[in-house]
Image: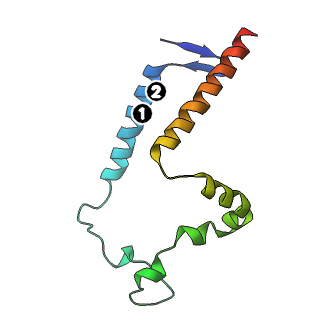
């Protein structure tokens, strides 16, 4: 089945063959590695010459990584935290509701 689009064509068989070829190439590249390698000193983290860093020093918390982003949008995040209940049924209901609204809008756009 060939689907023609503005940007060209999309053929699922071509994508499957491409995926298989890429997987074979990746497997061949991986096969060139040393089989006797089991890890060692080079896999340990290096922190300015500290012999064995503690787990707290090695672990980077997400709050540290995204601090500036969260701080810039603090008002939005505070509002969203109050809005969320943590109940999965609420999230599914929101998803179904938004999907229904999008379906109605897209259906109306097709008719008009």
Is residue 46 among the parts visible in the rendering? no
Q: As drawn, is 31 to the left or to the right of 74?
A: left
Residue 97: % across, % down = 58, 31
Q: Is residue 6 above or below residue 91?
A: above
Q: Nearer the viewer, residue 23 or 65?
A: 65
Residue nearer the viewer, 40 or 96: 96
Residue 68 placement (x, y as % from top left): 69, 68
Badge 2: residue crowd in 10 Å (few <14, some 14–19, many ≥20): few
Q: Is residue 81 left or right of residue 105?
A: left
Q: Residues within 10 Å of mark 1 (few under 14, many from 20)?
A: few
Residue drawn at point x = 58 percent, y = 69 percent: 63
Asked whether the viewer can see residue 26, the reply is yes
Q: Secondary structure at mark 1?
A: helix
Which residue, given by chain and number where applicable, does mark 1 sit on? 19
Q: Which residue is mark 2?
A: 15
Q: Position of residue 111 (x, y in %)?
A: 71, 9
Q: Position of residue 6 (x, y in %)?
A: 68, 18
Q: Is residue 63 above or below residue 57?
A: above
- Scheme of image coloration: rainbow
Q: Residue at x 47, y 89 (%)?
A: 49
Q: Residue furthest left?
A: 36
* Vertical comparison of 92 with 70: above or below: above
Tell whether 45 sits left or right of 28.
Answer: right
**Viewer-closest of 48 and 37:** 48
Q: Residue furthest top?
A: 111
Question: Looking at the picture, does residue 79 appear above or below residue 97?
Answer: below
- The secondary element bearing badge 2 is classed as helix
The alpha-carbon separation of the residues under discs 1 and 2 comes to 6 Å
Which of the 4 image quadrants contains residue 74?
A: bottom right
Q: Are marks 1 and 2 in contact (CB under 8 Å)?
A: yes
- Residue that lies at the very extreme toward the right in this rendered image: 112
Query: At x 41% / y 85%, what residue is drawn?
Result: 54
């Amino acid at each position: 089945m060939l689907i023609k689009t503005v940007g060209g064509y999309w053929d699922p068989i071509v994508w499957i063959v491409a995926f298989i070829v890429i997987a074979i190439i990746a497997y061949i590249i991986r096969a060139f590695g040393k089989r006797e390698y089991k890890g060692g000193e080079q896999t340990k983290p290096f922190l300015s010459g500290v012999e064995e860093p503690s787990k707290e020093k090695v672990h980077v918390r997400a709050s540290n990584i995204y601090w500036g982003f969260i701080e810039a949008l603090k008002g939005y995040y505070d509002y969203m935290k109050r809005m969320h209940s943590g109940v999965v049924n609420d999230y599914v209901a929101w998803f179904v509701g938004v999907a229904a609204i999008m379906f109605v809008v897209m259906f109306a756009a097709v008719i008009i």
